Image (spheres, coloured by chain):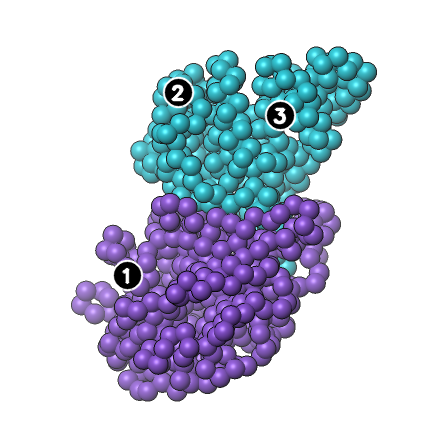
């Protein structure tokens, strides 16, 4: 059990190029649409539109590693809570953005409020589980995930359970669940499946099985070629396997396009390992400056764990975006 | 938009999300049938069709099976399917959108290739095709519709607000010579559905649409909100409903149709002893019905069905034209009964009506939003945003 096998169904999904173009088109179109829907306190269409926009920005932020998208989503979510405090959707949106910035305690509080304002329990629990997981409360997260999987054993619930079991180190169980989730996939969006494969790659990376990890990162890249966290980890594996040139080739465009300094830092390490010390120092300094800036703005997300930022709950929500379970 | 965001599965990929189906006799050429399928609500920029989806029109002959109360159609076995598929764009070949190619496969396997957005229609004898971004044709008072389900108050009583004028969609427009394509023995009544279906195996029907608003307005259930019955409904073959979810769908329709009927304080649609609403069978068989022997008419949606319910002969082509005010017609029927008083949403035409020449939908909004400026405006302080 490691890479793609005969047990793993290969669903047809929309090309990553089309999906990224359409994600951009959705964001642009929704931006215009919610502006036209009015901005009064009680405009449900404005709340729904902005909440959808929050989700789309979080998705693009995760896929392209754009902290600016996360920040914009957080601003929109704050607007929602301020202007529609009786609408659970607003609190749900803010909980998602707060969880993205690893502000877990306040995210959980927002979820409680979302539940009191009309968001159904299953949705709240689906958001709560990855937060508890990130806090290390695996047992509680497991109860929530298993309940969801029993209630509706589809792609989203099984994928979330697989990710949780992978993080708990239950590799055999996780492998079975990853394959099951894959078999349940009935959508055409490539993002949820790429996210699932990415998380499967992370599991094998954590186990030190570099080639297995690489095969899942490659599978995820095949779905969404621009998937920055996947490319970043692929580079990490390539570097660990001694392919410094390949790693540098993957990281150089990411370090330029992403405002997440993790990529500049990774590039600096790869350049250094390949003997390009001067350029490595330049990227390292650039990353350090950006980290300092981000620590000031988002201390929970960046203080003491810059590399961890790429593995926050945004990826779990990408699994949930499919919703075809 | 009439049908957008209708189910979690379609929302996950906007290129699968059908915003409207239209079917009408060609206003430009007599004897031709025009079919339009729009997807991707509020498309902006370089929106593209999915290369993993088959976009499909299905046409079958129908005849009235029951007239009067509980009207229903009998659907013929012969089917004519027109399937559209698209490629992934080729990088470096002009703009992303202009690099997308498509293909229409007609009954009998005849194929015609085209390019997204090409203003020159692709043609075969008896068939022409357009696919590309167009201005979404339907106008409605979105602010007026929303409170219906939430408050139980009659629709459209507040000040009307038209939907934004510049909402684009991805359109597929097909015009066919009906006699040449279907032969002389078919019709004149035809049933039309539009579908998005996955291209892989097993093929999954992502969404289907017949009459406007059936799923969005009548299948929503605030009591069991996390049961997405619309996805179950979409997965069904509209011409051959399986018994698996039929009961749940009928229950929803019975309950919601009765709810709408009560909005004016009287009952125009009495339920039978089993609690079945007279419109449930008719609307549950979700397809557009048009009469190809009648000339093009701009406002004829549901007239064939209404005539059946009233026990009289229909007078128009039925179907659905691009500028038909279907929302008014629907609510008048549901709330006030057959020939009930008109209920207006206060918005009677779009800012830019459709045209009478192929591809009939007008060109897309030329002013796509500036996403940066737009997003900044959206998150402005409350006092500023509300002004």
Give the image location of residue B74, x and y in percent: 26, 72
Q: Residue at position x 59%, y 36% from top? A: A225
Q: Are marks 1 and 3 on the same chain?
A: no
Q: Which residue is mark 3?
A: A232
Q: Are marks 1 and 2 on the same chain?
A: no
Q: Nearer the viewer, residue A321 or A191?
A: A191
Please identify the quarter of the rendering in which residue B269 is found. bottom left
Distance of mark 1 from mark 2, alpha carbons? 42 Å
Q: Residue at position x 70%, y 63% from top? A: B366
Mark 1 in CB contact with mark 3 (< 8 angstroms): no
Residue A103 in the image: above or below residue B341: above
Give the image location of residue B385, x and y in percent: 69, 52
Give the image location of residue B121, x and y in percent: 59, 69
Q: Which residue is mark 1?
A: B240
Give the image location of residue B374, x and y in percent: 70, 51
Q: Colour of chain B?
A: purple
Whether residue A300 can be seen here: no
Distance of mark 1 from mark 3, alpha carbons? 49 Å
Q: Colour of chain A?
A: cyan
Distance of mark 2 from mark 3, alpha carbons? 24 Å
Tell me the tag on residue A1: 2
Whether residue A146 can be seen here: yes
Q: Nearer the viewer, residue B143 or A247?
A: A247
């Amino acid at each position: 059990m490691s890479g793609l096998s005969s047990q793993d169904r290969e669903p047809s999904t929309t090309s990553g190029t089309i999906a990224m173009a359409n994600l951009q088109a959705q964001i642009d179109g929704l931006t215009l649409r919610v502006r036209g829907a009015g901005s009064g306190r009680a405009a449900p269409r404005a709340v729904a539109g902005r909440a959808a926009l929050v989700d789309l920005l979080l998705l693009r932020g995760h896929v392209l590693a754009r902290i600016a998208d996360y920040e914009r989503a957080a601003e929109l979510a704050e607007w929602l809570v301020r202007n529609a405090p009786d609408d659970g959707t607003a609190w749900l949106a803010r909980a998602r953005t707060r969880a993205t910035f690893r502000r877990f305690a306040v995210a959980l509080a927002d979820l409680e409020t979302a539940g009191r304002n009309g968001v159904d329990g299953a949705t709240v629990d689906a958001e709560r589980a990855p937060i508890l997981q990130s806090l290390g409360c695996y047992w509680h997260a497991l109860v929530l995930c298993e309940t969801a999987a029993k209630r509706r054993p589809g792609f989203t619930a099984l994928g979330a359970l697989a990710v949780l079991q992978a993080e708990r180190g239950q590799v055999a169980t996780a492998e079975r669940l990853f394959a099951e989730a894959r078999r349940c996939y009935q959508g055409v969006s490539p993002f949820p499946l790429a996210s699932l494969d990415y998380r499967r790659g992370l599991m094998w990376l954590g186990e030190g099985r570099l080639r297995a990890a690489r095969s899942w990162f490659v599978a995820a890249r095949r779905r969404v070629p621009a998937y920055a966290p996947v490319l970043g980890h692929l580079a990490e594996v390539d570097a660990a396997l001694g392919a410094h040139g390949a790693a540098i080739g993957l990281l150089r465009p990411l370090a330029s396009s992403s405002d997440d300094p993790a990529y500049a830092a990774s590039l600096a390490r790869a350049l250094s390992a390949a003997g390009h010390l001067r350029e490595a120092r330049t990227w390292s300094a650039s990353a350090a400056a950006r980290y300092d800036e981000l620590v000031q703005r988002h201390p929970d997300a960046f203080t003491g764990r810059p590399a961890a930022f790429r593995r926050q709950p945004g990826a779990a929500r990408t699994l949930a975006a499919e919703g075809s379970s | 938009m009439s049908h957008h965001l209708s189910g979690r599965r379609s929302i996950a990929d906007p290129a699968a999300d059908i915003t409207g189906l239209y079917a009408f006799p060609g206003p430009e050429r007599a004897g031709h049938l025009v079919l339009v399928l729009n997807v991707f609500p509020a498309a902006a920029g370089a929106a593209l069709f999915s290369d993993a989806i088959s976009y499909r029109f299905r046409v079958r002959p129908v005849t009235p099976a029951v007239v009067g109360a509980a009207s229903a159609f009998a659907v013929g076995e012969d089917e004519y399917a027109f399937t559209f598929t698209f490629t992934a764009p080729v990088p470096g070949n002009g703009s992303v959108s202009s690099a997308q190619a498509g293909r229409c496969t007609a009954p009998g396997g005849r194929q015609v290739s085209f390019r997204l957005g090409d203003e020159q229609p692709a043609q075969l004898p008896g068939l022409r095709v357009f696919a590309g971004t167009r201005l979404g044709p339907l106008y409605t008072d979105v602010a007026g519709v929303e409170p219906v389900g939430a408050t139980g108050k009659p629709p459209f009583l507040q000040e009307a607000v038209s939907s934004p004028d510049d909402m684009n969609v991805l359109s597929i427009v097909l015009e066919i010579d009906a006699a040449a394509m279907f032969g002389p023995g078919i019709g004149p009544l035809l049933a039309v559905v539009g579908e998005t279906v996955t291209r892989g195996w097993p093929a999954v029907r992502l969404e289907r649409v017949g009459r406007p608003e059936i799923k969005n307005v009548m299948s929503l259930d605030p009591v069991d909100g996390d049961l997405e019955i619309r996805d179950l409904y979409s997965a069904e073959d509209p011409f051959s409903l399986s018994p698996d979810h039929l009961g749940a769908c009928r229950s929803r329709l019975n309950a919601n149709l009765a709810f709408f009927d009560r909005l004016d304080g009287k009952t125009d649609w009495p339920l039978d002893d089993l609690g079945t609403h007279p419109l449930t069978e008719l609307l549950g068989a979700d397809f557009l019905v048009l009469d190809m022997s009648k000339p093009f008419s701009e406002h004829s949606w549901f007239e064939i069905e209404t005539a059946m319910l009233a026990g009289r002969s229909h007078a128009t082509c039925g179907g659905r034209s691009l500028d038909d005010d279907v929302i008014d017609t629907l609510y008048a029927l549901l709330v006030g009964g057959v020939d009930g008083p008109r209920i207006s949403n206060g918005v009677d035409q779009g800012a830019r009506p459709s045209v009478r020449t192929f591809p009939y939908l007008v060109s897309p909004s030329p002013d796509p939003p500036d996403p940066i400026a737009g997003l900044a405006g959206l998150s402005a302080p409350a006092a500023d945003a509300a002004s």
